[in-house]
Amino acid sequence: KMAVVIAKVDEGATCSFEYASPVGRLKIIASAAGICAVKWMKETSGSIPVKPLSDHVPVACGSKKFSHQDPGPSATIDQTSAAADGHLRTCVEWLDAYFTGTLLQHNVTKPPIVLDPKSDFFLSVWTTLASTGVGERLTYKQLAKLAGHPGAARAVGQAVRKHNIPILVPCHRVIRSGRVKSIGNYSGGQGPVTKEWLLEHERTMMK
């Protein structure tokens, strides 16, 4: 189960790490409380690779840099940065297990996430979404009902689009309903292509 922290994010007290994934390079941002953002970085061109990438590019974290091969703590950073550093490492380990397809085979700790909702409605949608399991798919209507807002599917869709921690808060698992079979739009990576890759990857993990 993922821990959820409700807090304002101080951009000046965060660390970041660039993670090369099968769906593009991700910038993971953490504070002392947990992971507060996962952002797709600009890609020049090219399609989604079919195999997970293994390179992890370190960027500044507090007053130090670290690589995926160097998990040891640093005595040169303050307590706040050390906590954020720990959350980044936990997140990288979870993403490694997720993208290599071994997540369900091991007890991998999921990092705490920091949410700064605009309203209680947003919070209920985001926390409900964060609790969905690997391989699960649901419609906006179903998500609205689970979040305690039946009949608010359109507003739920807007809330889903506004959170900034994709994959950890798996908005890719929310699909369209209706006669037209479509997985729906996706704002991350290469759009619906990335969403389809994530859904298929999770379907494969469930086998």
Image (spheres, rainbow, N blue to C red):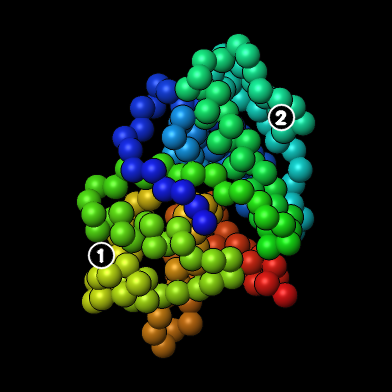
From this view, report whether residue 92 is shown above or below residue 154.
above
How far across and down, in percent of the image, does residue 126 sit? 37, 57
Image-based side of 113 in relation to 86, left or right = left
Secondary structure beneath label 2:
loop
Q: Residue at x 60, y 62 (%)?
A: 198
What's the residue type where badge 2 is placed?
Answer: Pro
How would you rate the neighbour count of disc 1 (Cα within 10 Å): few for under 14, some for 14-19, many for 20 or more? some
First in residue order: circle 2 vs circle 1: 2
As drawn, which residue projects farthest toward the top? 76
As drawn, which residue projects farthest toward the bottom? 179
Evaluate whether residue 22 shows in this view.
no
Q: Quadrant of the C terminus?
A: bottom right
Evaluate whether residue 77 shows in this view.
yes
How far across and down, in percent of the image, does residue 67 sit? 71, 28
From the image, tell me which residue sits under label 1.
155
How would you rate the neighbour count of disc 2 (Cα within 10 Å): few for under 14, some for 14-19, many for 20 or more? few
Q: Are marks 2 and 1 in contact (CB under 8 Å)?
A: no
From this view, report whether residue 186 is shown above or below residue 9.
below
Q: Which mark is residue 71?
A: 2
What's the residue type where badge 1 is placed?
Answer: Ala
From this view, report whether residue 120 is shown above or below residue 64.
below
Q: Residue at x 58, y 21 (%)?
A: 60
Marks 2/1: CA distance? 42 Å
Q: How many numbered marks does the figure carry?
A: 2
Secondary structure beneath label 1:
helix
